[in-house]
Image (tube, rainbow, N blue to C red):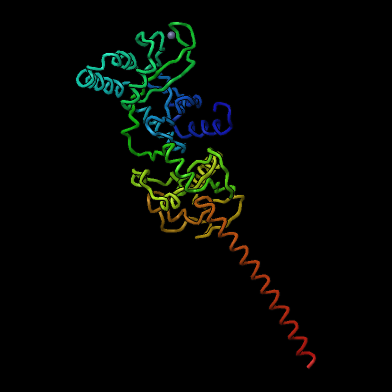
């Protein structure tokens, strides 16, 4: 993941979306064994800096963010949560919880206590001696905690590159505001949409096709987000999503941001065709919130397949019109000739 151009673009995009004085996006990293993807970050606070990794793919919590704005928001949330004064409160609360309700977790508790440093912890030097540390980490994850894993992190204590674990004071499972597309839901959407790549206009049997919300997230307000994506009907899925690969996803996001800012409704290949409305954002429709969707409908990227079909129909119609006009002209000429002979 590190070297791919899409990753580089995403990193740059994320850096633009966060305050560079507070947050440095170092890079993106994948822990494929656990289906986790992280943004490696440095958070700057007046009291010092915090090196961490924020997972934006985290299988255990069903967190699979693809949209850069959402990933950036998650990172901003993590920045707030990791602020020393907030982290302190969170740690105190967790200590209380573990002492009261989880005092029976005698094997796992020392691990959790060590992780409460909220620093990268070496499994050999910082965590309790236990051959089955992976099991303990699993246990903590299953309780709903967010743990980042780094498989080759330099340890100052043992001087080796070892597996390090970091506890992030954020509970993604209970967090609202993100539409979580789980791998199962993604699969379902891919199947319902028949692996049809809306941009390429063809079926591509590849797992790289990502469900794209037709209604761009940049216009969403908190009320736009739908809680129970699992209960969507097939029809609702067809109405709500199209499939795009990662590169086109990023491109759509960029176009959507420009549309949001300028009110010019964007193009594909520079083609100024809109199946509803025109190039300008319609008057009287806000660009933000649930009702803004009306302004997106008809713009090329909103529903690319519909745009393509509509354009093809119109091209056919124009062709037919030209033929009809040519025919009428010819008939007129013939008529004139006949009249001349009379
Ligand atoms: Zn170590």
Q: Front-most of 258 and 201?
A: 201
Q: Front-most of 106 and 221?
A: 106
Check the image and name the residue furthest to the left. 100
- In the rendered view, tell whether residue 38 sits above or below residue 153: below
- In the rendered view, tell whether residue 103 sits above or below residue 55: above
- In the rendered view, tell whether residue 272 sits above or below residue 132: below
- In the rendered view, tell whether residue 204 sits above or below residue 321: above
Residue 113: horizontal and vertical position, in percent? 30, 15
Residue shown at 41% from the left, 30% from the top: 59
Residue shown at 72% from the left, 81% from the top: 331
Residue 332: horizontal and vertical position, in percent? 71, 82
Check the image and name the residue furthest to the bottom. 342
Q: Is residue 82 visible to the viewer in this orientation of the structure? A: no
Q: Is residue 142 visible to the viewer in this orientation of the structure? A: yes
Q: Front-most of 307 and 89?
A: 307
Residue 25: horizontal and vertical position, in percent? 48, 26
316 displayed left or right of 191 = right
Which quadrant is home to the N terminus?
Answer: top right
Which quadrant is home to the C terminus?
Answer: bottom right
| Residue 95, quarter of picture | top left
- Quadrant of the displayed image that contains ligand 1: top left
207 displayed left or right of 328 = left
Check the image and name the residue furthest to the right. 341
| Image label count | 0
Residue shown at 36% from the left, 11% from the top: 127
């Amino acid at each position: 993941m590190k070297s791919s151009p899409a990753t580089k673009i995403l990193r740059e995009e994320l850096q633009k979306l966060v305050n560079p004085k507070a947050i440095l996006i170092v890079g993106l990293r994948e822990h494929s064994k656990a289906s986790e993807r992280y943004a490696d970050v440095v958070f700057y606070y007046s009291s010092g800096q915090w090196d961490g990794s924020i997972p934006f793919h985290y299988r255990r919590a069903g967190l699979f963010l693809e949209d850069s704005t959402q990933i950036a928001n998650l990172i901003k949330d993590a920045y707030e949560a990791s602020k020393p004064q907030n982290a302190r409160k969170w740690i105190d609360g967790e200590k209380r919880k573990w002492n009261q309700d989880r005092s029976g977790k005698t094997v796992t508790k020392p691990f959790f206590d060590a992780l409460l440093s909220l620093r990268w912890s070496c499994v050999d030097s910082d965590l309790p001696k236990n051959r089955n540390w992976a099991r303990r980490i699993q246990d903590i994850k299953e309780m709903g905690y967010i743990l980042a894993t780094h498989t080759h992190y330099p340890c100052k204590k043992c001087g080796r590159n070892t597996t390090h674990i970091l506890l992030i004071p954020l509970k993604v499972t209970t967090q609202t505001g993100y539409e979580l597309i789980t791998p199962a839901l993604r699969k379902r959407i891919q199947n319902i949409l028949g692996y049809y790549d809306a941009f390429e206009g063809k079926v591509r049997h590849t797992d790289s096709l990502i469900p794209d919300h037709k209604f761009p997230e940049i216009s969403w307000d908190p009320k736009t987000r739908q809680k129970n994506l699992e209960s969507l009907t097939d029809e609702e899925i067809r109405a709500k999503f199209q499939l795009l690969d990662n590169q086109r996803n990023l491109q759509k996001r960029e176009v959507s941001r420009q549309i949001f800012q300028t009110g010019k409704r964007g193009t594909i290949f520079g083609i100024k065709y809109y199946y509803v409305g025109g190039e300008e954002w319609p008057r009287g429709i806000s660009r933000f919130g649930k009702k803004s969707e009306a302004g997106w409908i008809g713009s090329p990227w909103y529903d690319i397949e519909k745009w393509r079909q509509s354009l093809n129909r119109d091209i056919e119609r124009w062709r037919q019109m030209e033929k009809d006009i040519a025919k009428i002209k010819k008939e007129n000429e013939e008529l004139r000739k006949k009249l001349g002979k009379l």
